[in-house]
Amino acid sequence: MKKTPKTVNAYLAALDPRKRATLQRLRRTIRAAAPKSEECISYQIPAFRLEGRMLVWFAAASKHCSFFPGARPIAVHRDELKAYKTNKGTVRFSPEKPLPATLVRKLVRTRIAENRARSRA
C-alpha cells in the first residue's frame, strides 16, 4: 500500500484479485458474526469496532493474509488453529487456504465476549 486508505473499500481495491476476494469473504463473515459493528481503518488496515472498542483487524501482506482477533480468542481456539501460523494476536493464512467461516465466527464471538467482560470490570 502506497497511501494510507481512508476506507475499507479503498484498502481492498488496492489488492491483487486473490487477496481481495479472500479478505472480502473474511469481511462478510466478520460482519455476520458482529452485525452491529462498524468498519474503520485502524493502524492503516481494515478493522471493526463494536460498542466503542476495537474488535478485530485484517490485512494483506506480500505473501499472506492476516486476521487479528487478539490473543485470547487465539488461545481459546488454538486446537482449531493448528493448521495456521499464529502468534500472540495474529492468524496468518494464504488466499488459497482461507480461514473457515465457522472458525472466524468463533474467534469474533470470543473477542466480543472478552471486550464485554472488560467493560463490566
Image: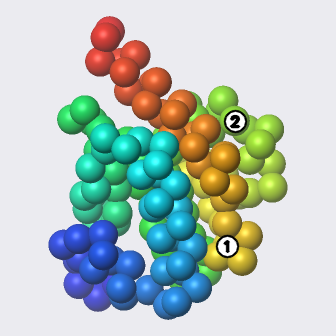
Which amino acid, mark 2? His
Estimate how packed mark 2 is, as few (under 14), some (14 to 19) or many (20 or more) residues with alpha carbons within 10 Å.
Answer: some
Q: Is residue 30 above or below residue 78?
A: below
Q: Is residue 54 visible?
A: no
Quarter of the rendering containing residue 119 = top left
Q: Is residue 99 above or below residue 33?
A: below
Residue depicted at x 38% and y 27%: 115
Q: Helix, strand, or loop for circle 2?
A: loop
In the rendered image, the quadrant that contains the C terminus is top left
Q: Helix, strand, or loop for circle 1?
A: loop
Q: Position of residue 38 (x, y in %)?
A: 26, 50
Position of 21 compared to 51: left or right? right
In the rendered image, the quadrant that contains the N terminus is bottom left
Position of 113 compared to 65: left or right? left
Residue depicted at x 34% and y 63%: 46
Mark 1 or mark 2: name the one nearer the start of the chain: 2
Residue where numbered disc 2 is placed: 77
Residue where numbered disc 1 is placed: 94
Q: Position of residue 81 (x, y in %)?
A: 74, 47
